[in-house]
Amino acid sequence: MSYPIVTLKKGEGRTINAGGMWIFDNEIDKIDESFENGGLVLVKAFNGYPLGIGFINTFSKIRIRLLTRSTDTIIDKAFFEKRLINAWEYRKKTVDTSSCRIVFGEADFLPGLVIDKFSDVLVVESLALGIDKYKSLIVNTLKEILESDGVLIRGVYERSDAKVRTNEGMERIKGFIGDEFNTDVEIIENGVRYIVDVKDGQKTGFFLDQKYNRLAIQKLCKNAKVLDCFTHTGSFALNAGIGGAKSVLGVDASELAVSQAEKNAELNGLSGSVKFLCTDVFELLPELERKGEKYDVIILDPPAFTKSRSSVKNAVKGYKEINLRAMKLIKNGGFLATCSCSHFMSYELFTETINKAARDVHRYLRQVEFRTQAPDHPILWSSNESYYLKFYIFQVLDEM
């Protein structure tokens, strides 16, 4: 099949040659034929060497998202079926698939697409015009693959309401794909039960990427006094409760999230030991310090403080502030679990920021472990954007 040909400028395409999948608007020299936004094009280097087939969109700074390196591949149901089978088989080998991310965009070679499975429900997030055109085909094909493996799907909900869609010239939409169903979905993760609101919850309804990081804190929390900051719907707090914590306080600025967290605590029979407070963490931490409060374990799981390179400097201040405040509140020998979910907050910068906070409060940090996102959010080494979550557990010690 022939496609419109896009030729790159001389000296451009280094990202693609290094294994990346994005071509930006300033890298393109010419386009030989007419094309449709969201349609497929053949990409060539300045010397005519073929680089692959991808989706083009002139509304986006990411002008082309590469779909395949092969220039004679037919993009049809069989193509997507192979990609989806590979994605599902990988999850079966690496994670608990009762609830998991089945498709993670570029890391599964399906650029711009996220599909999460919550028990017997799929939630789809389409963020690129090209992949959006194949959305129905992909969803139906995935359902067939799962059902042939004995995994029945009772409903699909679309959460393509992220602001980033406007950068692709697309409307923000959400709604049922197929028959309607109850959008409060119960899942079990690490022995903890949750009600996931796939309709109105953040992103696709629940943050699956922290699955095994949540599990890692359970063993630290037995008989502990725990503070969980930015608790969202209570996931870390509930893992602390399940782990045998004496008391847990989960804090979040969202009333909706706190209300859901309280319901999740009740669902797990933890309402007596796990409490929640709706307030600003940045205001609460100094207040707790003034009151002389001390904790055995503090968890910091903030939203991304930066979503662009231009705001990294302010993000560093935010990360330093909450980590510094938390270290002041932790008992000698207690534990700090702290993370950043921003791609632009690099491992090196995040590590340096925590280290500076520790020096400023004269505490020693003994690293227990460093973790990243769960394996169902795979890190593709040629796709820097796929690595975003940094998660540390430290023991916090007084000066010698």
Image (spheres, rainbow, N blue to C red):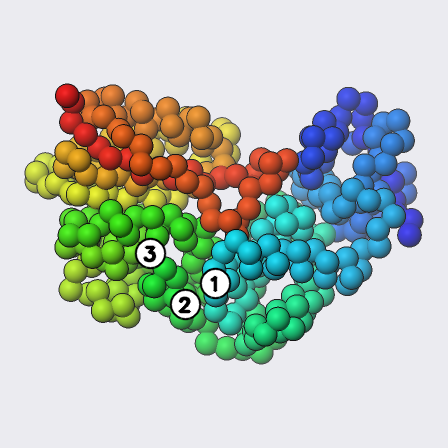
- Residue at screen point 75% across, 51% down: 38
Query: Mark 1 or mark 3, which is nearer the start of the sequence?
Result: 1
Residue occupied by mark 1: 99
The residue carrying pointer 1 sits among few (fewer than 14), some (14 to 19) or many (20 or more) residues within 10 Å by Cα, namely: many
Check disc 1 and give the amino acid type: Ser
Picture quarter containing residue 370?
Answer: top left
Disc 1 is placed on an element classified as: strand
Disc 2 is placed on an element classified as: strand
- Residue at screen point 15% across, 64% down: 272
Q: Nearer the viewer, mark 3 or mark 1?
A: 1
Query: Mark 2 or mark 3, which is nearer the start of the sequence?
Result: 2
**Residue 180: % across, % down:** 54, 77
Residue occupied by mark 2: 187
Q: CA distance from mark 3 to mark 2?
A: 12 Å
Check disc 2 and give the amino acid type: Ile
Disc 3 is placed on an element classified as: helix
Where does the C terminus fall, quadrant-wise? top left
**Residue 233: % across, % down:** 33, 58
Residue occupied by mark 3: 235
Residue 338 is labelled as: none
Answer whether labels 3 and 1 touch (C-beta < 8 Å). no
Q: Is residue 168 above or below residue 322?
A: below
In this image, 205 relative to 282: left or right?
Answer: right
